[in-house]
Image (cartoon, coloured by chain):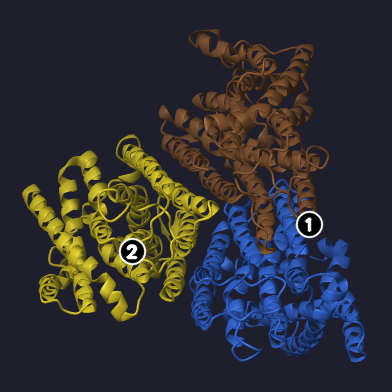
Chain colours: A blue, B yellow, C brown
Amino acid sequence: MTQADQPFNLRRFLLSGGGWPYLLVPFIPLAIVLELTHASGSVIFGASAAGVIPTAALMGRATEELAARSGPGIGGFLNVTFGNAPELIIAFFALREGLQEVVKASLVGSILGNILLVMGAAMLVGGLKRERQHFDRTAANAQSLMLLLACVALIMPAIYELIIGGSLPSPTEKSQQFPSDLEAMSVGVALILLATYVAGLIFSLRTHKDLFNPEHAAEDHIGEPWSVRKAVIALAVAGLAVGVMSEILVGSISEASETIGLSPFFVGIIVVAIVGNAAEHWVAIYFAARDKMDLSVNIAIGSSAQIALFAAPVLVLLSFFVGPFPMALVFNGLELGAIVLAILIAQQVTQEGESTWFEGLQLLATYAVLGLVFYYV
Amino acid sequence: MTQADQPFNLRRFLLSGGGWPYLLVPFIPLAIVLELTHASGSVIFGASAAGVIPTAALMGRATEELAARSGPGIGGFLNVTFGNAPELIIAFFALREGLQEVVKASLVGSILGNILLVMGAAMLVGGLKRERQHFDRTAANAQSLMLLLACVALIMPAIYELIIGGSLPSPTEKSQQFPSDLEAMSVGVALILLATYVAGLIFSLRTHKDLFNPEHAAEDHIGEPWSVRKAVIALAVAGLAVGVMSEILVGSISEASETIGLSPFFVGIIVVAIVGNAAEHWVAIYFAARDKMDLSVNIAIGSSAQIALFAAPVLVLLSFFVGPFPMALVFNGLELGAIVLAILIAQQVTQEGESTWFEGLQLLATYAVLGLVFYYV
Amino acid sequence: MTQADQPFNLRRFLLSGGGWPYLLVPFIPLAIVLELTHASGSVIFGASAAGVIPTAALMGRATEELAARSGPGIGGFLNVTFGNAPELIIAFFALREGLQEVVKASLVGSILGNILLVMGAAMLVGGLKRERQHFDRTAANAQSLMLLLACVALIMPAIYELIIGGSLPSPTEKSQQFPSDLEAMSVGVALILLATYVAGLIFSLRTHKDLFNPEHAAEDHIGEPWSVRKAVIALAVAGLAVGVMSEILVGSISEASETIGLSPFFVGIIVVAIVGNAAEHWVAIYFAARDKMDLSVNIAIGSSAQIALFAAPVLVLLSFFVGPFPMALVFNGLELGAIVLAILIAQQVTQEGESTWFEGLQLLATYAVLGLVFYYV
C-alpha cells in the first residue's frame, strides 16, 4: 500500500482530517463574529454557508469512523441515521424561523442536487479516463423505487389541494398554511414514509445486507482509523458546530436574499442544498475517480431516498411542535415538476448499471437548466 | 406429489371448490333478503360486497376449468375474455344507475389495486422466505407497454378538456356530461384501444404464445379438473350470481356512502375495486408463495392492461346505450396522477425481472398513500 | 451479392437515385406553378407538401454519400448536422411568417413522429417475419437520456409561466408573446441544450464512436457510391429545392388549414412533421425489414434527440433575428403531455434492446390516439 499511495499524499491530506473542506474552517469563527456584530445579512450568509461545509464534513467523517468501529449492523444504522444530519439541522432552524417554503425547497434541492449534481459530477469525472464504469444495478434500482414511492407521497397531496379548489404554494412566499385536512393527510403520509424507511433499514442492514455492503478493500478507507473516543467527541463537536452555523445561516437568509436579489426559493433549492450536501459531493466524486462507482451511486441515490423517506417526514412531524403552524407536504409546481423529472432520470441512468462521461454531463446540464429556471423566480 | 401435498391440505381446501372465498357464500342470500326488506343502505352494501367475492371466485374458477379443457388457443381467449367479467358486470350496473364517475373510479381502482395491492402483497409474501424471486421480464415488459399506451389514452382527452377551457370531473360528483367533441373522441380512442387489445390477443395466443403460456407443472392446477359440463354450468350460475350481487351492490352505493361518510369516489376506487379483484388477489399471492412469480406478475400486470384496453373501452361504447348520457374518457386529477405514477412504478418493478419482499412492501406503502389521500375526498 | 440481389431489383430502384420518393418530383414544378398562379391555398399546400418529400430525400442521400467519402469523423458530423436540415428549413420559413406555434408544433410533431410513427412502423414491419429483433441498448439508452434532458428543458419554462400567473399558449393561436423573462430563460436553456449537443457529438464521433458506428456490411449502402463532386452538387441543388418548397408550403399553411378545416396546430404537429421526416420513415423501415434494427432505432431515437437538442435551440436563437418577436420555449398542454408520454414510451421500448411486431403496433396505436386528440383542436 505504501508504494501505491506515495503519489497520492496531497489527496490523502485533503481528504483526511486536515483536508480540503477544512480549509474553510476559518469561516466558522468569522460567521460568529459577523453575526454578533450585526453585519450585513448577505455577508453573514456567505460566511456561515462556507462555515457549514467543514462542520458537515467533520460530522460525516466522525459518523463513518464510529460506524467502522461498531460492526456492520449498528454501523450501518449510524451511517444512515446521521448521514443527512446537517440538512436536518439546517431545516430545523428554518422551520423555527417560519421559513417553511425554504425548508421544502431545500429538501427538494437536496434530492435534485444528489441525483443531478453529485451523480453527474461523479459520472463525468469518473468517466473521463474510462470508456464506461459499472455499478450494481440491483441496489440502485431498489433505491430508485423508494424515490418513486416518495414521488407519489410528494405529488398526491398537491393534486388533492388543487382538486378541492386550493392553490399550490407560491415560490415567492416564505410559508403558507393549508386546510387542516392537508395537515392531517401530511402526518399520515409522513408515517407511511417513515415506516417504509424503517423497513428499508431492515432490508439493507439485515435481510439483504450483502447487496448494500459489499466488501471494500482497505484503501476505501480515507486515512487512519479513529478511536471510538475520538469519533464520539468529534461527532459531538461537529453536531454543535453544525447547529451554530445553521442557526446563523438560516437567520440571514431573508435579509441576504433581498440584498443579493435572489429569491428565498432559489437560496433554499440551490444554495442551501449545495452547502448541506458539500461533503457528499466530494466523497462521491472521490470514489468515482477511483472507479468505485458502486459507492458513488449509492451515496447519490441513497441520500436522495433518505431525504425523501426520512428527513421530509421527520420535519413534517417536527413542524407540529416548532414554528408558527404545521408544514403540509404540499410542494409548488416547479418543485413537483423538477422532482418527477429528476426521479425519472435517476431511473433511466441506474437501470443499466453502467455510466459514461456523457451521462454525467447530461445530468449536470439538466441541473443547469433547473437552476436557470429557478433563478428567475 | 401425495407426500409433498400432505401438509397443504388446508390450503388446498381453501383454494378448492369449497375454499376460502366460499366461506362468504352465506352473504349472497343475506344480501338478497336485505335488499328485498329495504334494509339500511350501508348494511346492504356490506353484505352484497361480501357476496360478490365468492361469485367472482367461482366465475374465475369455472373459466379456468373451461379453458383447461379447450386447448391453449381458445382456452387463452376464454381466460382473458372472462378474466375481468365481474368488474365489467359491476360497472355495467353502475353505468345504468348513472354513476359514471364511480365507474371510472372503479376502473382506475382496479388498475391501481392490481399493480400496487395484488403485486405488492404477492412480492411481499413470496419474498419473505427467499432472498429474491425471478420472473420473465419480456412478458412483463410487453404488458407494461400496453399500460403506457393506455396512459396516453386516459390522459390526452383530459388535457384536451382543460385546453378548451373545460374542467376535469370533480371526484365528488356522480356523473358529468362533457362536450360532444369529447364523447366522439372517446369513441375513437376506445376503438383504437380495442383494436390494440385484439392485436394483443393474436400476439399472446398465436405469434408469441410461448412467452405467455409457459409449461406449468401439474401442481399449478388447484384441485381436481372439472368436466366441461360442470364448468359451463358453474360459469352460467356464477355469471347470474355476479349480476344479482352487482345490481344490489351498485344500488346501495349512494346511500351507503352517505351513511358511512365515505365519498362515492372512495367507494369506487378502493372498495369496489378490491371486491371485484378479490379472487385475483388470492390467486396471485398463492402462486407467489409457491415461487411461481411469473404467474403472479402476469395476473397483476395482465389484469391491469386488460382493464385499460378492454373493460374501459367496452364501457365507453356501452355508455351510449345504457345510462343517461355517454361516458367520456375524462378522468379527474387524482385518478390521472395515481394512474401515471402506478404505471411508472409497474415499469420500474418489472424491468429487472426480480423482486424482493421490500419491493412488495413499497408497493403496498404506495397503495396506502393513495388510499389515504383518496379518503379525504 | 449479385445473386441475392436479383429479386430486389425493384426495391433497389425505389431506394436508389430514381426511387420511390422521386416519383413525387413532378409536384415540385407543379407547386411552383400553382404558387405563381395564386391557386387555392389548400391545393398549393398539397402540392408543395408532396414536393418537399423528394427534395428532402435527395438531401439525405447526398449527405450520406458525402459522409461516406469523408471518413467517419467528418462524415458523422455531416450526417448529424444535415440530418434534420429539411425540418430546420421549413421551420425557418414558418418563423419568418410569424407562425411560431406552428414551428413549435412541428418540432414536437417531429419528435412524436420519429418515436411513434417511424419506430413503430419499423418494428411492426421488421417483426412480422421474425419472432423478435435485437438492437444495441447502450446506444439507444444514451439517446433516451438526451430526450429526458430535453423533456426538462421543454417542461420547466412552461411550469414557470404557469407559476407567475401566465397561461400556456393556446393551440389555436399562430403565435404568442411571452414576458421577456421567459425569452431570456429560453436563450439560456437553448445554449445549455446546444452545448450538450456538441458534447454528444464528441461522445458519438470521438470517445465512444464504436457504440454508434458499428461496422456495416457493404449491402447497407443503397446503390452505387457517388463521387464527392456529384454529392456536393446534389446537396446544393437539394438545399435550394427544399428551401423553395418550404417557403411555398409555409406560405399556404394558414389559408389551407382554414379551407380544409384543420387547425394550423394539427397541420404543424402531424402533416408538416410527417412530410419533413418522410425520408427517415422510409429508410428506417427499409433497414428494419432487413433486420438491421440497430440502424432503425438509431434513426428514430437519434433524430428525435437531434430535433430537441439541436433544431429547437437553433430556432429559438434564430427567432431573435427572424420574425415578429422571439419564440419562447413554452409549449402548450397537449404538446407537453404528448412529448412526456412519448419519451417515457421511448425509454420503455429501448431499455430491453428487443422488439416485436406488437411493440411496433402499440407505438402506432399511440400515435393514432394522439392524432385523434389533436384533430379535435
Residue closest to the far left: B229
Q: Which mark is residue B102?
A: 2
- Percent of width and height locating residue B71: 19, 40
* Label drawn at residue B197: none
Picture residue at 34% right of the left edge, 48% below the top? B313
Rendered position, A347 above or below C325: below
Mark 1 burial class by Cα count in 10 Å: few <14, some 14-19, many 20+: few
A114 left or right of B126 in image? right
**What is the distance, in whole Å, between disc 1 and disc 2 at their CAs?**
44 Å
The part of the image, by quadrant, that contains residue A233 is bottom right
* Quarter occupied by the N terminus of chain C: top right
Mark 1 secondary-structure assignment: helix
Q: Residue at x 69, y 72 (%)?
A: A105
- Residue at image mark 1: C181
- Mark 2 chain: B
Instruction: Say which amino acid is labelled 1.
Output: Asp
Q: Chain of mark 1?
A: C
Residue C70, horizontal then vertical, whole percent: 78, 22
Q: Secondary structure at mark 2?
A: helix
Residue A147 occupies quadrant: bottom right
Q: Is residue C211 above or below residue B277?
A: above
Whether tag 1 and tag 2 are in contact, CB under 8 A, the answer is no
Which is nearer the eye, A215 or C296?
C296
Q: Nearer the viewer, residue C186 or A7?
A: C186
